[in-house]
Image (cartoon, rainbow, N blue to C red):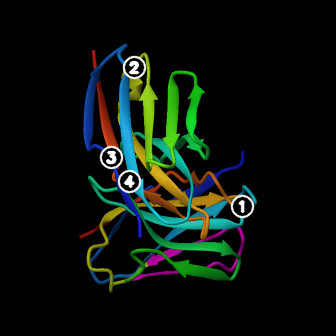
Amino acid sequence: DGGITQSPKYLFRKEGQNVTLSCEQNLNHDAMYWYRQDPGQGLRLIYYSQIVNDFQKGDIAEGYSVSREKKESFPLTVTSAQKNPTAFYLCASSPPRGNEQFFGPGTRLTVL
Amino acid sequence: GQNIDQPTEMTATEGAIVQINCTYQTSGFNGLFWYQQHAGEAPTFLSYNVLDGLEEKGRFSSFLSRSKGYSYLLLKELQMKDSASYLCAVHNWDDYKLSFGAGTTVTVRA
């Protein structure tokens, strides 16, 4: 089945540690996105990539980093510089000149 | 920048109708999405409006007025499973990003 996978579903880390969230898609989509969702707030864009080896900062990129070495993969690293990293993280992808975005199941990160 | 407003919460009775409004102020408007999101899950696509007017899909309909910067999602014959958050998202033509509203939590009561 085609789709987007994110792992793990739940992730716990100690404060000060970097952590990488995975996102893989087999939909052959060019564009991929990372969003953060906090209670009572909408999705906020962290980074996005419209093609392999290229990515742009979204609205809240500080404290995060990404790479796009393969079309299928767009991992997000939450660094220790991110002041409030506990949140629900959603990855999405869309076809060329994309309209609809397809979302993965999300990773809930808790920093202790 | 984007400014997207929708009500925070709505409550309705099973079998009733609920209308969720979304207003937006944006440059480079290309279209408007509605997504449904159950708690702790990924958003799922409901509708996409580009032109003015009403799009109907079963129990769900979505309306757009580009000149007024206004959309609504209409949920008919409400079922308990419709209890969820409904997200309005504006699609921009210049960079193909989506900008999301904060979401409207709909609670359906028996």
Q: Is residue B55 above or below residue B13?
A: below
Amino acid bearing label 1: His
Disc 1: which residue: A29
Q: CA distance from mark 4 to mark 3?
A: 7 Å
Q: Nearer the viewer, mark 2 or mark 3?
A: 3
Q: Which residues are magenta?
A: A63-77
Q: In the picture, residue B15 is in which quadrant?
A: top left
Alpha-carbon span between mark 1 and mark 4: 25 Å
Q: Nearer the viewer, residue B90 or B77?
A: B90
Instruction: State the quadrant of the C terminus of chain B.
Output: top left
Q: Residue furthest front?
A: B67
The residue identified by callout 3 is B6
First in sequence, mark 2 or 3: give its number.
Answer: 3
Question: For this view, does A72 lie left or right of residue A44?
Answer: right
Same chain, labels 1 and 3? no
The rendered magenta stretch, by its main secondary structure, is classed as loop
Task: Please report the residue visible at 62 percent of the width from the left and 55 percent of the height from the top.
Answer: A4
The question of residue A21 being in magenta is answered with no
Q: Which residue is mark 4?
A: B101
Residue wearing tag 2 = B78
Provide the secondary structure element on which disc 2 rests: loop
Q: Earlier in the sequence, mark 4 or mark 2?
A: 2
